[in-house]
Amino acid sequence: MAASPTSYDAIILGAGAAGLMAAARAGQKGMRVAVLEKADKPGKKILISGGGRCNFTNVNAGPGNFLSDNPHFAKSALARYTAQNFIDLVNAHGITWHEKTLGQLFCDGSAKQIVQMLLDECPDDRVDVICEAEVTAVEHEDNRFAVMASGQIFTAPKLVIATGGPSIPKMGASSFAYDLARQFGLKVVEPRPALVPLTLGGDDVLFRELSGVSAPVSARAGSGKKKAEFAEAALFTHKGLSGPAILQISSYWRHGEEIGITFLPEADAEWLIGLKKDYPRANLRTVLRHHLPDRLADALADRIGIETEFSNVPDKALRLAGQQLADWRFTPNGTEGFAKAEVTIGGISTAELSSQTMEAKKVPGLYAIGEAVDVTGWLGGYNFQWAWASGAAAAEAMSDPARVK
């Protein structure tokens, strides 16, 4: 007997990357799925990603590229649905792509192709993607979930939280996933903006005058096991620091901590002393201008304060200048917040979920996937790979005949 219009095998909240992947895989396994999306169309965050070309995965994706209170949690899902699995899917749909730096894969055409591919993967007779469905209440009784959305009631024995985190609220992002998790007694790890520009104040505020200047650097943040270093570009902004290197370390930075920047990462600690021997009449400002944008070179030279020819500068002072350039310390006074954060760090605690199935241990039939969970990837396609992998893991578990009630 066919299911009634409001009765499904599974309800997925959110038609983003993770939700659409879960819907497609579950639908292909024969499940009747309702995907409820409050926006006017699915995949809105996919559409703006990668400058509109969607950095849909990274060939290097592995557990080491993710942050979580439990660094082992992501291993199972990532191992069972790999970057190559998604590349194969993209290829099967005839979507052409290219690799940029550091293993990042982008569509040759448009991110719209990825959204359409995911929708095409959803069997028409099995998956209903319902947009402009604002969820107002969720109830759980007699092993069934009832979801009230825009005046309709949807019921199913399986419910998947795939509504993401609060990053980019202008795209409709909110803390809905965390509120719902808490309703069911699940713990939430403190959510913070991640992959986000840092703001500068105090003595560092003068660097904001360099707005628009970019340079390759090595940037560091964090401490202990949660310490990281990335060698990419940094960009000075009218509020502080951005660019790939800064976005990466922002996930590791905590308020009140310093970050370290190495200008000229290829240079060793003694390089200025070596230049003194070869070019005794050179000065620091001129040398820095050979290697860095003029405005940045001048700002660094002004703060180091060595203006005379190298022949007049003691080796000790040059050594100290080299060390300062190799480990320039900034103390950000904050971030640009969820409004500019690409993703959220923190979320539904992995301690509450099965790493095999993404199902809540306390609430059978309740699943959480994607950015809603306390698993956050690096910049460069990693968060999409987590969305695909966690969505596939949940779908596999939901559609397992041994698990279907």
Image: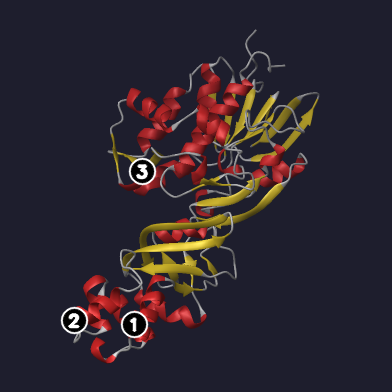
Amino acid, disc 3: Gln
List x then y, in percent, for residue 113: 35, 33
Quadrant position of residue 352: top right
Query: Circle 1 — which element?
Result: helix
Query: Circle 3 — which element?
Result: strand
Question: Going from the N terminus, do you reach mark 1 or mark 3 first?
Answer: 3
Q: In front: mark 1 or mark 3?
A: 1
Q: In 3D space, how far apart are the residues under numbered discs 1 and 3 (Cα atoms)?
A: 39 Å
Q: Is residue 349 visible?
A: yes
Colour logic: secondary structure
Amino acid, disc 2: Tyr
Quadrant of the image containing the C terminus: top right
Quadrant position of residue 357: top right
Residue to which mark 2 is pinned: 279
Count of marks overlaid on the render = 3
Q: Looking at the image, is 120 positioned above or below residue 184?
A: above
Residue to which mark 1 is pinned: 318
- Disc sitting over residue 104 in the figure: 3
**Residue at horizontal 47 percent and vertical 74 percent from the top:** 329
List x then y, in percent, for residue 7: 67, 21
**Residue at horizontal 53 percent and vertical 27 percent from the top:** 392
For label 1, count other residues whose C-alpha is less than 10 Å away and answer few (under 14), some (14-19) or many (20+).
Answer: many
Q: Residue furthest right?
A: 142
Q: In 3D space, how far apart are the residues under numbered discs 3 and 2 (Cα atoms)?
A: 41 Å
Residue 162 left/right relative to 315: right
Query: Circle 2 — which element?
Result: loop
Amino acid, disc 1: Leu
Residue 84 left/right relative to 177: left
